[in-house]
Image (cartoon, rainbow, N blue to C red):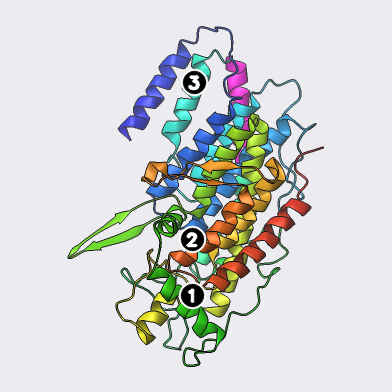
Amino acid sequence: MKKILMCCLALIVLWGCNSKKNYVAVFNDPQLYCNTVHELNTVVMGNNFSPIIASRNYLYANIAAYEVIAAGYPQKYNSLAGQLRDLQSLPKPEQNKKIDFEFASLLAFCKLGESVTFPEGSMSGYVDSLKIKAHDNGMPDEVFDNSVAFADTVSSAILKWSRKDNYAQTRSAERYSVTEEEGRWVPTPPAYTSALEPHWNMIRPLVMDSCNSFAPPAPYKFDIKDTTSDYYRQVMMIKNAVENLTPDQKHMADFWDDNPFKLNVSGHVMYGTKKFSPPGHWMSIIGIGAKKAKADFATTVYAYAKTSIALFDAFIQCWDAKYKYNTARPETVINKYFNADWQPYLQTPPFPEYTCGHSTCSSAAAEALTSVFGDNFAYTDTSELEFGIKSRSYKSFRDAAEENNWARFYGGLHFHYSCIVSTEYGRKVGDLVVDRLKMKKI
């Protein structure tokens, strides 16, 4: 709070002393937008938000920023109004009013990023730094005031729309019931956390017609007694794989772990460690892709918005399947029927096994990004370096999504057929987003 107050005082003093020097347009730097997304990523991680809730923060923040850009450059970009469910016409800038649309898009991003879930003010210190940056580079008072006002107008419209997506209703929905039925999901060690977001299929999808527009086939029937059954073979496959992991397989699993809160247990001591969630990881990948492609500011915002939409709908599709089938995790099955001491390589997250969230959202994101930057877009993912995990390189975004299949399998969290099915259906969601949304004008 003290830091925020100091930033506000500095902003007042500096703006009051505006020397009206020549304005330098500094906000059209695409890296600044990537840095702003990373700022939200850090705030999301600090608040222990689940991947599903995090996807909602990134979604509305990036849409708000995109709508500012679309309004500023209507010859290049279409508004998403009329394309996303329930999103009606949005404010347009008044003619002859000078606005720095890049600056306004950053402000709109921050406003939605903090307001959708956080207490308002979570990013105020960062917003003040942007405003000070505007002053330091000579932004005229008129441009500053117009930009702030337009950002607020667009933000208010997007925020109002976001509040009708049924999120509030899911906070008070009936709790998930745990039963002793064989093959059904139950909480897993070490925290034995309750089922996460069992009613996420109530959330309003944006491009899909409904939460079950892409309903995957039923998982293999639970059958642990018949050694020739498909289910038994899958259990043995993951058990043997985890018991014989190579260093590269462990690195692959660690790289795509993206556990926003891992509970570490050492004797009587317990402590948590945090990392970016799966959608947060893909936010970083977008930035890496934009930098390599040398994308301009508008294209960068477009890439983030399109991918955020794909991620958001993919989680709705996946969570509908998860709580339709309620399948047990490999850890639960192996501990009960084969080895009580067996542990997966990674910590099991608190929700049913089928389908795989990582595989679903990754393949959806890969399709969105491929539509922006092209296929065979080779890149090195350096996003995990800040968590002490060395980088990995990919031939394309789809290549990264395919690796995610094996990563979740090697981590001991998902049967491999679950990951295969999830990739296929996440791709369907991504394809729908690419096909239906007309964002960038040719």
Q: Is residue 106 above or below residue 312?
A: above
Disc nearer the start of the sequence (2/1): 1
Disc 3 designates what residue?
A: 133
Q: Amino acid at mark 2?
A: Ala
In the foreground, 30 or 212 = 30
Q: Amino acid at mark 1?
A: Glu
- Give the label, 1 or 3, closer to the camera: 3
Residue 60, can we see it? yes
Residue 407 has which mark? 2
Which x, y percent locates residue 147?
A: 61, 26
In the foreground, 400 or 438 = 400
For mark 3, give the secondary structure.
helix
Query: Does residue 147 belong to the magenta stretch?
Result: yes
Residue at 69% x, 68% y: name it. 214
Disc nearer the start of the sequence (2/3): 3
The extreme bottom residue here reads: 225
Q: Which region shows up in magenta?
A: 140-156
Q: Is residue 241 above or below residue 106?
A: below
Mark 2 surroundings within 10 Å by alpha-carbon count, few (fewer than 14), some (14 through 19), many (20 or more):
many
- Give the label, 2 or 1, closer to the camera: 2
Disc 1 designates what residue?
A: 174
Q: Amino acid at mark 3?
A: Lys
For mark 2, give the secondary structure.
helix
Q: CA distance from mark 1 to mark 3?
A: 47 Å
Q: CA distance from mark 2 to mark 1?
A: 33 Å
The extreme left residue here reads: 268
